[in-house]
Structures are given as C-alpha cells and as structure tokens.
C-alpha cells in the first residue's frame, strides 16, 4: 500500500507586495488595507507614505466635488530624446503604470463647501518631474483661479524638472512663477503643500511661493541633493537640513501638518484667506484687463510677457495712428518689440507696420503660446517657426495699408 506523504506549501520568503507594505522608517509590516484607512501613515512611527494624486484628491476634497480640467494634455517628444529608452516609451510605461497622462492633475472642487482650484502632482509618474504638461497645468490652474477669484491649492511632489524635455522643462519655472505673480498681485490666495519629496525645479519655482507654505512631516524639501548642496558651499550641513521640521524651525515653512489634520488645516486657512474682489472697471490700472499694477519689481518676466498684450490705449492708439499711418510708422511697433523681436523686425521693413503687431497678439495672455494649441510641448517652440516664416503679418500689413489708403 502506497504511503501518502503530507505535502507542504513552499514557504514564502517575502510577503506579497499587494497585501503588505514594509515601513521604510521602522521596518514594521503594515497591512495595506489598514494603511489606506489611516491615510497611509505608519501607525507605529508616523512615517508618511507617498500618495498618488488620486488618493490625495480623495483625501483633501469634498467627496465627488472634483472636476478635472485639461485631462487630455500629454507630453510630446520635441527633442527626440533618447537615453536608455526613448522618451515616448518612458511616458507610455509611466502612463501604463499609473493610469495618468502626466505627473499632475488639476481641476476645481470644494473643501468643506468652499470652492478651490487644485493642482496635485504625483511622484509615481516619472518621479513627479515637471515637463511642459506639469508646468502648463499649474499655470492653467493659477489662471483659472485668477479669473474665478477662487483660492489656488497646489500639492507638490517632484524630483525636479524633466530632463527629457531639456530647456522646455526649465521654461516652466518662469511660466508658473509668472502666473503666480499675477495671482499674488490680484490678491487671490495661493496655498502650497510640499509633500515628500519636493525638490529641484519645482522647489525652485512655484512650490515655495505660497501665501502659506505647508509641509507634511519629515518630507524631503530642497533644491539639490544633500551632498551637492554641501559640496557647493564647501561646508558641513547639519543632519536633516532638508527635512520639513528643520525648514520650519528656520522660518522657511509656515506649518508642518500631520496628514490626518491636513484637510481641516487647509479648510480653516481657506476660511481666513479670501480672494480680494475683482477691481471695478473705473479703478483698473491703465489698460490692464486684470487691473494689475503696471510695475512689479519681483517678476520682470511676467511684466515682459504682459507687454505683449496690446492695452486698450494701444489699440485705440493703433487705430488713430492707422488713419495717419505714414506719418508715424515706427512708434506703434515699439510696444510689441521686446517680447517678439523677430516678428517685429520683419514687418518693420514694409512701410507701415502700425497694425501688424495687433493681429498676431490680440488676446495673448502671459502664457498664450502654449495655450493656443492642445499639446503643450508642441506649442512651446512654436513662436520661432512663426517668426521665421511670418506668413501672416505681411498680408495683414498690405491689407491694412490698402484699407488706410482707400
Ligand atoms: Zn513605521
């Protein structure tokens, strides 16, 4: 008679990753479902795990209040960048892994019934790196907050600028800061939450410009890595100098808030920080459609961008000069020259360039080049091809000439 030997299941060396998470701080094994219930904060040591954008939105906003905007924005590959993998392949892999199109999500919602414009970054998507899409989403969120006069709330989680987009990703620093400066000047509040990690270009631009800068406990916050920072200034830096608590003690942050209290903290801040009402038409500063002061020392970049906008007086002046165009051809072109030097130089050669600048930049806000077309990275370099070919200004010039003659 054959003997039936008992069979043993092979011993598991590791816990299945979908069920358990090991706390990197205290080493405790945490059951994932339990961890989700406590907002992914380790119950034994208080370690804050990173959150996906989706989980963050669910945690912070009123249930069902979030309405995403510009969900279709996607990065392109303007540089044809290839390292170990081609950039489009990297994006596709990240999209597959996260279910997101890029590393940020923005939209509108409410917190305890108060409307708010939110933009949330996700470190899971290519390290939360900021390319043209992330920069564009932050900017659009700020612009929407400005128009709607609703506080802006941005949650940063990023390793910095996205190197695969080269200088286009660095341009996002200026773009986002320009949009936030307009928000600040208009008196619309901006809350910034710095989660783990907030570094590089995101730290160097919008993340630390909040009217209130909040951080989660023990979040890594800084520009460069600790070794690079220490090497640059050739000094020993104290341990933990890039952590929230240290930065708070040294006045760099306004609050370090435990995740369980974050929502109520933001809610009470929103109760105190109310957007200044839009200025009345008669109170508006000369010609500025948003009623912003014309000179702001803090950001000459946004100032420069605003000069591209034809003001009401300029438009009026252009039509006035139009009737007597041959007499004063050069003066109307000068306001548009600083931002678009190439386009301005070409129409300068025809006799009257007075109205050529106005058709190209009729309603261009500070970030118009990207806003004009859907995919953000495509449109960022677009001014140059337009400038070199200049198909539009020339017919515009001739027709206006004819109109003025006739
Ligand atoms: Zn722990």
Image (tube, rainbow, N blue to C red):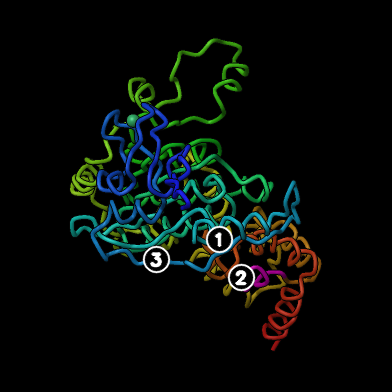
Q: Could you tell me if residue 307 is visible in this image?
A: yes
Specify whether residue 202 is painted magenta: no
Mark closest to the chain's N terminus, 1 or 3: 3
Q: Which mark is residue 96?
A: 1
Whether label 1 touches label 2, CB < 8 Å: no
Q: Quick check: is the Cβ at mark 1 less than 8 Å away from ligand 1?
A: no
Mark 1 neighbour class, 10 Å CA radius: few under 14, some 14 to 19, many 20 or more: few
**Numbered tag placed on residue 68 in the rendering:** 3
> Which picture quadrant has residue 340?
bottom right
Residue receiving disc 2: 358
Residue sitting farthest toward the bottom: 406
Residue 181 visible within the image: no
Q: Nearer the viewer, mark 1 or mark 3?
A: 1
Secondary structure of the residue carrying numbered label 3: strand
Range drawn in magenta: 353-361
Q: Residues within 10 Å of mark 2 (few under 14, many from 20)?
A: many
């Amino acid at each position: 008679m054959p003997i039936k030997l008992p069979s043993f299941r092979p011993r598991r060396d590791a816990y299945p990753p979908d069920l358990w998470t090991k706390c990197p701080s205290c080493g405790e094994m945490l059951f994932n479902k339990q961890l989700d219930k406590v907002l992914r904060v380790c119950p034994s040591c208080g370690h804050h795990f990173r959150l996906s954008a989706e989980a963050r939105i669910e945690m912070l906003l009123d249930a069902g209040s979030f309405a995403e905007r510009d969900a279709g924005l996607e990065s392109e590959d303007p540089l044809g960048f290839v390292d170990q993998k081609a950039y489009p392949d990297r994006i596709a892999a990240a999209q597959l892994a996260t279910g997101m199109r890029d590393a940020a999500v923005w939209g509108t919602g409410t917190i305890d019934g108060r409307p708010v414009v939110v933009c949330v970054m996700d470190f899971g998507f290519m390290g939360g790196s900021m390319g043209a899409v992330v920069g564009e989403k932050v900017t659009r969120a700020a612009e929407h907050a400005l128009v709607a006069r609703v506080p802006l709330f941005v949650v940063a989680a990023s390793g910095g600028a996205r190197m695969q987009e080269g200088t286009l990703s660095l341009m996002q620093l200026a773009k986002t800061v320009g949009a936030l400066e307009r928000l600040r000047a208009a008196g619309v509040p901006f809350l910034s939450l710095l989660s783990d990690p907030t570094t590089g270009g995101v730290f160097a631009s919008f993340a630390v410009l909040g009217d209130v800068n909040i951080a989660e406990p023990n979040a890594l916050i800084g520009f460069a890595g600790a070794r690079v920072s220490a090497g640059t200034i050739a000094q020993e830096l104290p341990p933990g100098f890039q952590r929230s608590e240290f930065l708070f003690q040294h006045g760099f942050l306004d609050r370090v808030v435990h995740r369980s209290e974050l929502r109520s903290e933001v809610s009470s801040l929103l109760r105190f920080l109310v957007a200044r009402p839009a200025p009345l038409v008669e109170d508006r500063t000369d010609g500025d459609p948003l009623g912003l002061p014309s000179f702001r020392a803090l950001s000459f970049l946004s100032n420069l961008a605003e000069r591209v906008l034809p003001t009401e007086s300029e438009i009026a002046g252009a039509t006035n000069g139009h009737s007597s165009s041959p007499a004063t051809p050069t003066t109307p072109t000068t306001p548009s020259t600083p931002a678009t030097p190439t386009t301005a130089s070409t129409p300068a050669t025809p006799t009257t360039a007075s109205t050529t600048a106005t058709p190209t930049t009729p309603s261009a806000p500070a970030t118009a080049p990207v806003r004009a077309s859907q995919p953000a990275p495509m449109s960022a370099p677009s001014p140059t091809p337009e400038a070199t070919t200049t198909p539009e200004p020339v017919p515009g010039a001739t027709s206006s000439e004819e109109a003025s003659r006739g």
